Image: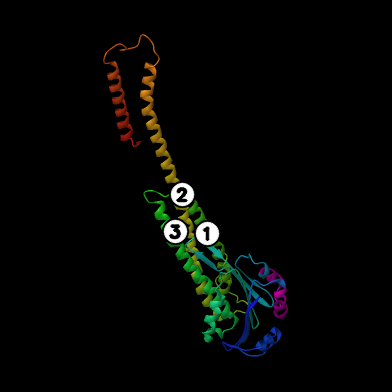
Amino acid sequence: MIVDCAIYRDGRRTEGPDDLSDALAQCRAGHDAFVWIGLYEPTEKEFDRVTEEFALHPLAIEDALKAHQRPKLEVYDDSLFMVLKPVAYDAEHDTVSSGEVMVFIGDSFVVTVRHGEESPLAAVRHRLEEEPEMLRHGPTAVLYSIADAVVDHYVDVAGELGTDLEELEAEVFSPSGGSSRSTASRIYNFKRQILEFRRATGPLAQPLVRLAGIGPFLASLPFVHDKAQPFFRDVSDHLTRVNELVEGLDRLVSDILSAHLAQMTVRQNDDVRKISAWAAMAAVPTMIAGIYGMNFDHMPELHWLWSYPALILVLVMLELCLYRLFKRRGWL
């Protein structure tokens, strides 16, 4: 459905005709004017009207309706199409969730399509309407502001993930080491959340490089002002820093998982050694008692008065010697 539709002239929101065709015609006839339409999870029927008026490409329309797209930038004859994935982090449940924002910009128009709840569009529109100097630059300013808001929130999410990962690291390397099952499950879940985050940040790097005109993408893009390249370059730098942080988090959580598994292996080895030591200590008296329990007539010291106390003393001495030996080797 259409959640907002406005015409902006000289950076300020103005009243305009309800008919999209008339609104677009007025914007193209005037100077420094464009129409911005915002949609939320539109159906194909709801999107048909926008498609006809703005001559959007069928492939881009399909992507906008179906969602579940990777961040990308596509250039068509009559529009430029960009996909971004805003994210949110629930620190209480250690989960990263993502939405999708599709942006069409063209000659005097902007169409934004939102899927999911994680979206900065309302805040971006409100902020731009309070900054007419920025909004005066037209659709390029809208595209830049959306990309900047999404990437800035990436920085916040990366910081929150880093804080929680430090807590998880402290838990793993605590004297108790945490519960093996719950800790390993939490580490694995944390790695999955970082992967979800990387799916949003990683593919966005190339579209921003193209918008910034870096390296092989020096040629300007249609419907994007050349003077906006330094601003997109700043957003690209922020995203590069985010991707470096995410890569570091991914390596760290892998190291934590390896360390936790190593701790569990060492702990299991310690348990096996302790069990083996106690079993060896139990085997000596069992063996001697088993020999004397065979009821043969001719056995050493069988009829000696002090044979029973002497045997008990020998057993105690042997147990003490074994205990000291295993204790010295760290088995007990």
Secondary structure under the numbered disc 3 in the rendered image: helix
SS at circle 1: helix
Q: Which residue is mark 2?
A: 258
Magenta-colored stretch includes residue 61: yes
Disc 1 and disc 3: Cα gap in Å?
11 Å
Q: Earlier in the sequence, mark 1 or mark 3?
A: 3
Color scheme of the displayed model: rainbow
Amino acid type indicated by mark 2 = Ser
Q: CA distance from mark 3 to mark 2?
A: 15 Å
Q: Is residue 59 visible?
A: yes
Highlighted range, magenta: 45-63
Q: Quadrant of the N terminus?
A: bottom right
Can you identify the residue that label 1 sits on? 193
At which x and y percent is residue 311? 30, 19
Q: Position of residue 289 (x, y in %)?
A: 37, 20
Question: Local crowd at mark 3 within 10 Å, few (<14), some, or many (≥20)?
Answer: some
- Mark 2 vs mark 1, foreground winner is 1
Q: CA distance from mark 2 to mark 1?
A: 18 Å
Image point (42%, 55%), residue name:
169
Q: Which residue is mark 3?
A: 165
- Whether the residues at callouts 2 and 1 have beta carbons within 8 Å, the answer is no
Name the amino acid, label 3. Leu
User: Mark number for residue 77?
Assistant: none
Residue ID at (33%, 33%): 326
Q: Describe residue 174's horizontal placement relative to residue 258 as left or right.
A: left
**Quick one: 1 or 248, which is closer to the camera?**
1
